[in-house]
Image (cartoon, rainbow, N blue to C red):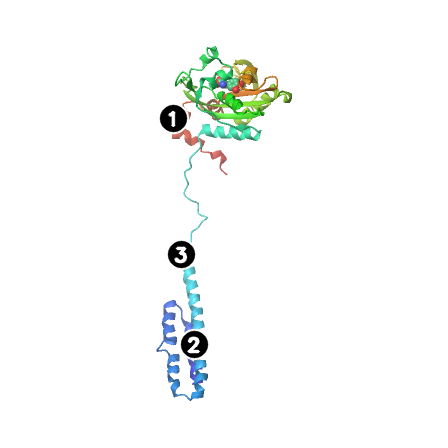
Amino acid sequence: MKSKIEEIKKKSAQEIEKITDLKSLEELKVKILGKKGELTSVLRSMKELAEEERPVIGSLVNEARDTLEKLISKKEEEFKKYEMNKKLEKEKIDITLPSSKLKRGSIHPLNRIIEDMEDLFVSMGYDVVEGPELETDEFCFKRLNLPEGHPARDMQDSFYITDNYLLRTQTSAVQARTMIANKNQEPIRMITCGKTYRREDDATHSHQFNQIEGLVIDKKERNVSLADLKGTLEVFVRKIIGANLDLRFRPSYFPFTEPSYEVDVTCFKCGGKGCNLCKQTGWIEVLGSGIVHPNVLKINGYDPEKYGGFAFGTGIDRLAMFRYGITDMRYLYTNDVRFLNQFDRKDEEV
Ligand code: DAH
């Protein structure tokens, strides 16, 4: 009987070894270990044995069963692994294949230039602040040294909502708001960008446009001077419009600054030689600026004996036109995708 068990074990092991697929393995498993299997029939015939032989044979059968079970499950594992690999192989995707091109949106040229200006001024230690578009006469004019009846108000044809409220005509209003909000009279270094409104509409003017405004105020002993203003505007113009541009300060008049300057830059079309764009002067007017008027300091809670600084402001739409060579300001507002697609940051692609 011992040799018979040995033989069953050997023969079954060989059969298991020969199996090549999971289904036949299942069938073989039933044949070897099932109720009708040879090992089971050995167990059944044990009653014919002598009492003392039974445990010996019983343990031999169990040992054979264990060994065969292990062989079968090992084989099962192998098949399962093989099937899984085959499946994975079939489902493989080639991640090195180029994808179909994604259509990307683009940032509007105005927002793009605003982002660039904010980044630049933040890097120079400025705060970026905001003010309301619906403004009071007080902040838009009076607090900027433009009392009622001042002739300079005529230059800003305005949209009044009531006698007192209007759509702001200039971001300069935020100068006054920042000074008033700064009750501790800490030094100020701020820029603000935003929409402004005037009653005008042609190729270089829109009833709604955007301005950037800058204000620096510090203690008199820190001596914030025209040289600081010039240096700041030089960095500004060269970073935002063009690296090779030169600046020219031309005396001018603004009610909120004294002295006041208009800042011209080299004509970007002719490089300063003179052309139709710059009216043969070689210069294009870009900014208004100056040293903050003592009245403005006084009206907004700063003692002009103790504080001083500079301010500047300009139209962002014009800056965008200069930077990108846009010929009609209205393109910036009509949302024509043929125009907007040209600003999809191709130049920034890595
Ligand atoms: N607010 C002026 C305008 O709309 C521009 C300007 C000029 C702003 C001189 C300033 C400045 O801050 O100092 O025409």
Q: Is residue 23 above or below residue 123?
A: below
Between label 1 and label 3, give the one nearer the viewer. Answer: 1
Marker count (numbered): 3
Residue 63, position as x, y percentages in the image: 46, 78
Q: Do the residues labelled 2 and 3 touch (CB within 8 Å)?
A: no
Residue 316 is tagged as none
Residue 272, position as x, y percentages in the image: 54, 19
Nearer to us in this view, 322 or 123 = 123
Please, what secondary structure does the residue beneath circle 1 have? helix
Q: Distance between the residues labelled 1 and 3?
A: 52 Å
Mark 1 or mark 3: name the one nearer the start of the chain: 3
- Residue at 46% from the left image edge and 27% from the top image edge: 110
Q: Name the residue under label 3.
A: 90
Q: Can you see residue 189?
A: yes
Does the residue tagged 1 have its C-beta within 8 Å of any atom of ligand 1? no
Please, what secondary structure does the residue beneath circle 3 have? helix
Q: Crowdedness of circle 2 by 10 Å Cα count: few (<14), some, many (20+)?
A: some
Residue 96, position as x, y percentages in the image: 46, 48
- Residue at 53% from the left image edge and 31% from the top image edge: 119
Give, as a three-letter code, the residue at label 2.
Arg
Residue furthest front as drawn: 183
Residue 334 is tagged as 1
Nearer to us in this view, 82 or 170 = 170
Give, as a three-letter code, the residue at label 3.
Lys
Nearer to us in this view, 35 or 145 = 145
Q: How far apart are marks 2 and 3 (CA)?
A: 37 Å
Q: How far apart are marks 1 and 2 (CA)?
A: 85 Å
